[in-house]
């Protein structure tokens, strides 16, 4: 197995893995996991875990199973190393190494040595790291693997450059060809890295940038993301040293964009600290400090790494720029300790230069002089011109601020000019280097101090020209832009990561497109599903295809209620048996179907525990479950779920198929709902005509009025007869007192019965008048919806409390309507009366909820919900019919919902709908905030 593979090979493994199931996946899964370890670390670990679980079911020998297990263990160890957990990574790498050595897998041993080398290097133990790289090269040659040997020796060479550049070049300079076009790109990346670092240490920054660009490209091609990040940083560093800040920031931004999604502390910290250094050179000290402190915090788990020492050097330079000399001395002192431990001469020179600079301004000139002279010696020994120039400039500053003996062999007027000219001589040998303006400024100040004003003026002009070239407006603007970008990066990080995941899904979907048979079948299925305009037919079609394409012990479809507060199972099959309807609140914290709708994202549970799946009544606990939202544009219609009784039932291919079916299902169900609404609209038009034709209601009205009026007529005729008998007695022999008293008692009873009957008749007549709503007879005004709702409910609280029920109101304060508060209040009162009369059984208390929201401009959505027994399906089509009631003779007149329907659709200009199940009933009003205009008429109020 190659150590690194190109992208085309990875795509081939991706495509080959999709149709495979069970142990048959292992031969493809292992190389894919290995080569995704930096491309997509999270997925690589998931595949490695899956592979180790599949091993017991394979027919491999015990030795082969141990080899595969060790290889997958290396994948997990590398992921942990990249995350900065060095101790845990070392333990896993050691376990893998022991297994591989016992089995004689020299390639595997070389890979384990490679990982152990980088763990040691990130700990700051470069000697151990170099030893592991030497062992890797030996193991690779024992396996006959020249590619791995080249990678190991290129890495050894690049670290040797930092210790002793001349010795490294003598040993390794002829080992690698400058043209790496025929080399495998995985190995070429490390050779280019060696050449780039060597050129950079020679201060040949143009050549270094070219080598690092080749390193960056080949590393990306072979999935070496950490190397690519480092190469991009080094390209930026070389441009920074060349004072091309615009190019530097471009490359630093590329590195940061590549590192951020990974979450790897070393890579992110390195990007931040080197970007900070470029910011410092552009004078943006606040941004520099913010970036450096974040970098050091991120790299806290890696205090021994070279990157951490680098950050300390930048922190010291920042402190010098801010005149914080004690802080600078502390930072460079800490860096010196790390540089000596690492044994890297470039850092040793930088640390001593920085300490000398700080000591100079702390008025400790002799110590400063000794430190600066040692820094010059170290830089000269390594032929590192950049560090040499910096150390010479510090020597010039020390002599400028303090009276010290002149240096041996001084050729200029004083020691300051002597060291400045030495710095100019060294800098002029750096190819492509733009001399910074402050070096010319220092010369100009010193010439002016000694009275040579002509040379001082010439130096000032040279400083102005250098500064104009260095600090172009474009580079400054770019610095400001990258600062803003960084400040917003934290808020965007999660969204960026999700977009990266989505892009990864899209790439894998493109691979799946190569399996044309599956795509053609899905396309045909989509055409079939979306031709149905009936929800029940859509449910059946989806179930048929889910059962045919996926492992599905359970398949269910949940749809949102109109108010979006609950989801109800509209269709469900479990092991061939239909599931009953059940309703779940969208805010239920345990139900995955509710969370899927609430968060608008796919949820996959590959191996469920007892608390991972909310068990609905009458269902079995499944092991794997996949939930996908049903959505059209931004509207959530519900959720589809498929579940299986075995773990990890849904791989990448299955999830893609289910997502596709969900997309087709959402479109089909949305079309079916639109068709149903069209049919309802036609029915409403017919109903309005029926309600307007009051003549068709006369038979019902006559039947209802017959009893109270007939009873009143009978009583009145009886009273007339009694009165005539009394008159005869008065005109006859005489009237006894007892007879008069009996008459008065009968008359009183008759009056009461007549009044009761006539009052009942009057009420019925008044209700009958309300059926044909006179849309112009109620006062229209602006009102607060919350206030009116509270007032209506307050008038009914005695009845609600007496029946041992309660009601909750959730109406925002700021909803204002220009409409008819009286009729609106009657609609709400009718809903409450209807719930009190029909919804609740006498032996239990019930709950009601009134909720309002403004989902669209100019409209309000009002829902009234109860948790009663619901409305029988056979009654749903008649609930708005006049005089239809299931409580005839028990307080129901059959007019309440009919009146409400007519008020909402006619006077208020809205729509009314109802949704009911065994868990309760929900009425939904969709009303305009401004009611439609109606002709006025001088008639009396008809609403009661």
Image (cartoon, grey):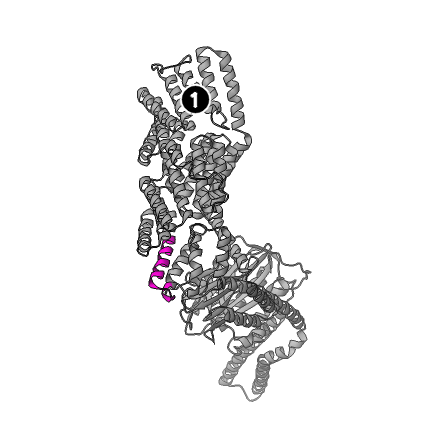
Residue where numbered disc 1 is placed: 423
Residue 551 x, y percent position in the rendering: 46, 69
Where is residue 866 shown, x and y percent of the image?
48, 67
Say above or below: 5 vs 209. Answer: below
Q: Which of the pair 218/781 is nearer the observer?
A: 218
What's the residue at 48%, 66% (across, down)? 641
Residue 61 located within the stretch drawn in magenta: yes
Residue found farthest to the bottom:
733
Secondary structure found at label 1? helix
Residue 651 higher or lower than 736, as above or below: above
Q: Is residue 339 visible?
A: yes
Q: Can see residue 286?
A: no
Residue 642 horizontal side relative to residue 398, left or right? right
Query: Which residue sits at x=41%, y=68%?
Result: 646
Label 1, residues with CA under 10 Å away: few <14, some 14-19, many ≥20: many
Along the line of sight, the residue nearer the viewer: 864 or 390 = 390
**Residue nearest the viewer, comparing 600 with 729:** 600
Quadrant of residue 707 within the rendered picture: bottom right
Q: Which residues are magenta?
A: 55-76
Q: Main secondary structure of the magenta part?
A: helix
Q: Residue furthest top?
A: 451
- Give the percent coordinates (x, y) of residue 863: 53, 63
Q: Quadrant of the N terminus?
A: bottom left
Q: Position of residue 424 (x, y in %)?
A: 45, 21
Vertical position of residue 178 compared to residue 42: above or below:
above
The C terminus sits in image quarter: bottom right
Is 589 covered by the magenta stretch? no
Query: Which residue is at the front of the view, 360 or 673?
Result: 360
Query: What residue lies at 37% left-to-right and 24% top-to-bottom?
Result: 376
């Amino acid at each position: 197995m190659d150590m690194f593979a190109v992208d085309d090979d990875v795509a081939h493994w991706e495509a080959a893995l999709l149709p495979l199931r069970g142990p048959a996946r292992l031969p493809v899964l292992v190389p894919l996991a290995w080569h995704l370890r930096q491309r997509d670390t999270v997925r690589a670990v998931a595949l490695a875990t899956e592979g180790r679980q599949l091993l017991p079911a394979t027919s491999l020998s015990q030795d082969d199973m141990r080899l595969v297990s060790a290889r997958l263990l290396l994948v997990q160890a590398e992921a942990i190393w990249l995350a900065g957990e060095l101790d845990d990574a070392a333990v896993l790498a050691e376990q893998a190494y022991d297994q591989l050595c016992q089995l004689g897998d020299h390639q595997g041993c070389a890979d384990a040595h490679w990982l152990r080398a980088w763990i040691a290097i990130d700990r700051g133990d470069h000697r151990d790291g170099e030893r592991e790289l030497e062992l890797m090269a030996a193991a690779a040659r024992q396996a006959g693997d020249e590619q791995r040997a080249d990678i190991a020796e290129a890495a050894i060479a690049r670290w040797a450059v930092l210790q002793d550049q001349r010795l490294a070049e003598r040993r390794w300079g002829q080992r690698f060809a400058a043209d790496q076009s025929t080399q495998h790109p995985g190995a070429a990346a490390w050779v280019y890295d060696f050449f780039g670092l060597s050129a950079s240490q020679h201060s040949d920054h143009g050549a270094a940038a070219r080598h690092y660009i080749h390193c960056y490209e080949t590393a990306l091609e072979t999935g070496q993301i950490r190397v690519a990040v480092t190469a991009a940083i080094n390209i930026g560093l070389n441009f920074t040293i060349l004072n091309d800040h615009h190019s530097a920031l471009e490359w630093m931004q590329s590195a940061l964009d590549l590192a951020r999604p990974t979450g790897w502390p070393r890579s992110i910290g390195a990007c931040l600290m080197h970007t900070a250094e470029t910011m410092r050179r552009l004078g943006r000290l606040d941004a520099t400090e913010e970036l450096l402190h974040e970098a050091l915090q991120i790299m806290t788990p890696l205090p021994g790494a070279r990157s951490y020492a680098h950050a300390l050097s930048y922190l010291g330079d920042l402190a010098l720029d801010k005149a914080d000399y004690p802080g600078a001395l502390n930072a460079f002192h800490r860096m010196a300790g790390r540089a000596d431990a690492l044994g890297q001469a470039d850092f040793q020179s930088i640390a001593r230069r920085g300490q000398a600079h700080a000591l100079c301004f702390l008025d400790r000139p002799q110590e400063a002089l000794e430190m600066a002279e040692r820094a010059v010696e170290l830089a000269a020994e390594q032929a590192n011109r950049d560090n040499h120039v910096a150390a010479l400039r510090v020597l010039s500053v020390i002599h400028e601020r303090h009276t010290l003996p002149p240096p041996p062999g001084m050729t200029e007027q004083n020691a300051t000019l002597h060291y400045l000219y030495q710095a100019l001589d060294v800098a002029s040998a750096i190819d492509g280097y733009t001399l910074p303006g402050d070096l010319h400024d220092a010369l100009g100040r010193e010439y002016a101090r000694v009275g040579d004003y002509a040379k001082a003026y010439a130096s000032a002009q040279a400083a102005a020209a250098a500064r104009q070239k260095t600090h172009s407006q474009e580079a400054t603007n770019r610095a400001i832009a990258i600062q803003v970008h960084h400040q917003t990066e934290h808020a965007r990080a999660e969204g960026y990561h999700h977009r990266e995941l989505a892009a990864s899904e899209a790439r894998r979907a493109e691979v799946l497109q190569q399996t044309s048979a599956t795509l053609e079948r899905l396309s045909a299925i989509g055409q079939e599903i979306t031709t149905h305009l009936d929800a029940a037919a859509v449910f059946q079609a989806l179930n048929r295809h889910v059962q045919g394409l996926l492992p599905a012990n359970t398949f269910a479809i949940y749809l949102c209620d109109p108010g979006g507060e609950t989801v109800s199972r509209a269709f469900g099959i479990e092991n061939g048996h239909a599931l009953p309807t059940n309703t779940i609140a969208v805010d239920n914290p345990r139900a995955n179907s509710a969370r899927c709708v609430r968060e608008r994202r796919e949820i996959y549970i590959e191996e469920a525990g007892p608390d991972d799946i909310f068990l609905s009544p009458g269902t079995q606990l499944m092991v794997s479950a996949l939930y996908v939202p049903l959505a059209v544009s931004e509207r959530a219609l519900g959720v589809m779920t498929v579940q299986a009784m075995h773990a990890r039932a849904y791989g990448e291919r299955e999830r893609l198929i289910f997502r596709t079916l969900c997309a087709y299902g959402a479109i089909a169900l949305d079309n079916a709902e639109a068709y149903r609404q069209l049919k309802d609209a036609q029915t409403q038009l017919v109903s309005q005509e029926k309600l307007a034709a009051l003549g068709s209601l006369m038979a019902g009205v006559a039947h209802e009025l017959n009893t109270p009026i007939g009873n009143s007529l009978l009583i009145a005729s009886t009273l007339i007869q009694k009165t005539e008998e009394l008159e005869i007695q008065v005109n006859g022999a005489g009237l006894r007192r007892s007879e008069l008293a009996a008459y008065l008692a009968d008359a009183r009873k008759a009056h009461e019965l007549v009044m009761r009957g006539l009052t009942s008749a009057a009420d019925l007549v008044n209700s009958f008048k309300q059926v044909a709503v006179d849309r112009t007879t109620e006062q229209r005004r602006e009102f607060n919806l919350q206030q009116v709702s509270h007032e209506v409910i307050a008038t009914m609280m005695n009845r609600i409390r007496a029946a041992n029920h309660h009601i909750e109101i959730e109406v925002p304060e700021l909803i204002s309507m220009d409409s008819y508060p009286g009729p609106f209040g009657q609609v709400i009162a009718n809903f409450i009366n209807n719930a009190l009369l029909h919804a609740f059984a006498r032996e239990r208390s019930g709950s009601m909820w009134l909720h309002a929201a403004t989902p669209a401009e100019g409209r309000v959505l009002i829902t009234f919900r109860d948790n009663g027994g619901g409305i029988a399906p056979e009654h749903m089509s008649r609930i708005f019919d006049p005089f239809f009631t299931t409580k005839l003779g028990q307080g129901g007149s059959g007019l309440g919902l009919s009146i409400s329907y007519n008020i909402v659709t006619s006077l208020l200009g809205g729509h009314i709908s109802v949704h009911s199940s065994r868990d309760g009933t929900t009425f939904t009003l969709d009303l305009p905030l401004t009611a439609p205009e109606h002709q006025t008429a001088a008639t009396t109020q008809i609403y009661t």
